Amino acid sequence: MADSKYLVGVFDDGDELLHAVEDIRHQGVKIHEAFTPFAIHGLDKALGYSFPRMGVAAFLFGITGTLCALLLTFWTMGVDWPINVGGKNFFPFPTNIPIVFELTVLLAAFGMSFTFFFMEDLGPTSKPIIFDVRSTDDKFVVAIDLAKNKLSETEISKLLKESGASEVNVKEV
Amino acid sequence: MAHSTHEIPSTEERFEFKSETKRNLIIAALIGVVMVAIGSFLLSKGWSIGVWESHGGEHPATGHEVAGHAEHGGEHGATLFARIIANIWMNSVYFLGISVVGAFFIAYNYIAKAGWSSSIKRVAEAIPSFVIVPGVILIILMALPSTRHIVMHWTHDGIMDPASEHYDKIIAGKAWYLNLPFYFLRLIAYVTVWYFGWKAIRKYSLLEDEMGGLENYYKGRNASKLFMVFFAVTASTSAWDLSMVIDTHWFSTMFGWYHLASWHVAGLATMMLTILLLKDQGYLKIVNESHLHDLGKFIFGFSVFWTYVWFSQYLLIFYANLPEETIYFRERFTGFQGRYWWPFHISLVLNFFFPFLILMARNSKRRPTFLKLGSVSVIIGHWFDFYQMHMPGIAKDQGGIGIIEWGTTLTFASLFIYFIANELSKANLYPKNHPFLEESMHHDI
């Protein structure tokens, strides 16, 4: 692990960071990640992130829930232990809708949360890299992986300074 | 992206209501009246054009046989006149709701201190100007005994009098709520307070344009709070008074929500359609994809909410299987020779399945074509929703969908558009001194 070297640009203002990200990406610098105390509108677009495919995961988990719920209600109410409720069919469709709905939502919600934790490596055992602790307070931080960039350390450092960074630090992890 | 552009579009925009459009709308309204006249004439002669139109009262008792014991004390079958009154009543309630939702929208946006909506605020503000028209029509229909008896079963003479042969114990038990003085008090209160509540909010909004400053914003917010307190109660009670008591025996505790959800989503769809049509004509340049996306989410969310409430009401009645409750759905499924089966199911498709599928994806909520399709579907769908709420109780075995329905709706819709366009043209299309307008301009999601 100790061979990755990051350049950490620290900004005092969210808007400055946003414009800096646009500028330095325009210069061909690949950015590892940006860290801000609060969400900044448009930063995901500036960083060039594609639209998340969480919807696909949600659909797959949701449809699993739907099928499980239908199977559950069909088996318990219709096959295994049929009960006569008000003279209705043993498997009346409307009565199953709440269960189907609930289980769809439940599995979709849990599935999406766990997908997110897994994909972002946010588990009890994960050890995230803290590039600058002040990014949880009042600083806006952008991290650049030097190994993945063609430009040299001094060149990127200069670019960061030019686009408004108040400090540029080196972080080895 | 809003951040990199520093060009701010002009906040001075005025909608021009052309005299040609005015004339066309008035002609359309008159055509609607003529259509009702022609339709009634044809039906009285026994000729029918349209779906499920029966032949001029040949078998007045059929509906009662099928519907079982729903209506007793009403030996008379429905007449053609009842059908016309039912249409006027139904369209009045529908358009009254769409209109008042404009004020409701502004009120909750004010109370939530929402910034994004301030650029479309003037559209929402224009819609409630129509409240007065259906409001007055409803009051007139209730004031005239001949039409009142058609719409409201509980107003029949002697129905609450134990000595009378028309005595109905269940309806008599509701006399503390369903009596004419109290009913009129409520009906007039709805119309006047909704209308003047909107007038107050509108007044402060227009004053803000002239004076600037925050004073009128705070006043508008206070007016919104008062409006909201009143509307919170009357949204439910008006649902009972205008729609639920038509089937006097029947009641549902979900009805207030169901009715409000129906009004709300139809109102939002109307707003969306108005905004998109204005944008097509080159107005409302500040309104961008993100605003449309937010309003689209509103429509999507509340069409699902409507379905949720509708289904909750249905499921309780379905599961409990009590005869006095299931009769409501029995009338709509198989009653009156099954003539209300189609409107009932069309309403479900247009209000839930179609907008649900078409507005689900993020991109479709940002594209005018999809939003137009969704909005039109919701607007037509909720017309059918109100149709199936009111018609079985009022028009009974005379219900149908034909020239009379098209004509009445055309008249109401033309007048509605006339009122909105007229109100829009009275003020700047943006609240130019609104404190959140700047935020709304940069809205980006």
Image: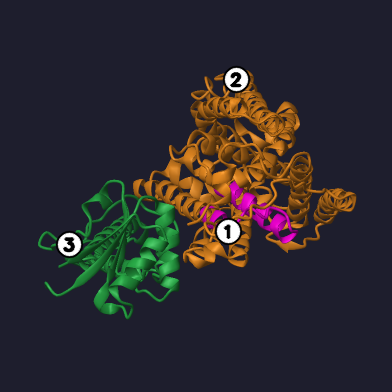
Chain colours: A green, B orange
Of discs 1 and 3, which sits in the foreground?
1
Element on which disc 3 rests: loop
Q: Which residue bears the numbered disc 3?
A: A128
Label 3 CA crowd tier, 10 Å (few <14, some 14–19, many 20+): few
Residue bearing the label numbered 1: B5
Question: Could you confirm whether marks 3 and 2 are on the same chain?
Answer: no
Report how many numbered discs are placed on residues in the image. Answer: 3
The answer to whether one can see residue A59 in this image is no
**Does the CB distance between marks 1 and 3 fall below 8 Å?**
no
Q: Residues within 10 Å of mark 2 (few under 14, many from 20)?
A: few
Q: Give the range drawn in magenta.
A: B265-294
Left or right: where A42 falls relative to A139: right
Q: Which residue lies furthest to the left in this view?
A: A125
Q: Is disc 1 in contact with disc 2, using a CB cutoff of under 8 Å?
A: no
Which numbered dot is residue B182?
Answer: 2
Q: Nearer the viewer, mark 1 or mark 2?
A: 1
Specify whether residue B217 is painted magenta. Answer: no
Query: Which amino acid is tagged 2?
Result: Phe
Vertical side of B175 occupied by B265: above or below: below
Determine the CA span between mark 3 and mark 2: 67 Å
Give me the C-alpha separation between circle 1 and circle 3.
36 Å
Where does the N terminus of chain A fall, quadrant-wise? bottom left
In-image side of B317 versus B279 (left or right): left
**Protein chain holding label 2:** B
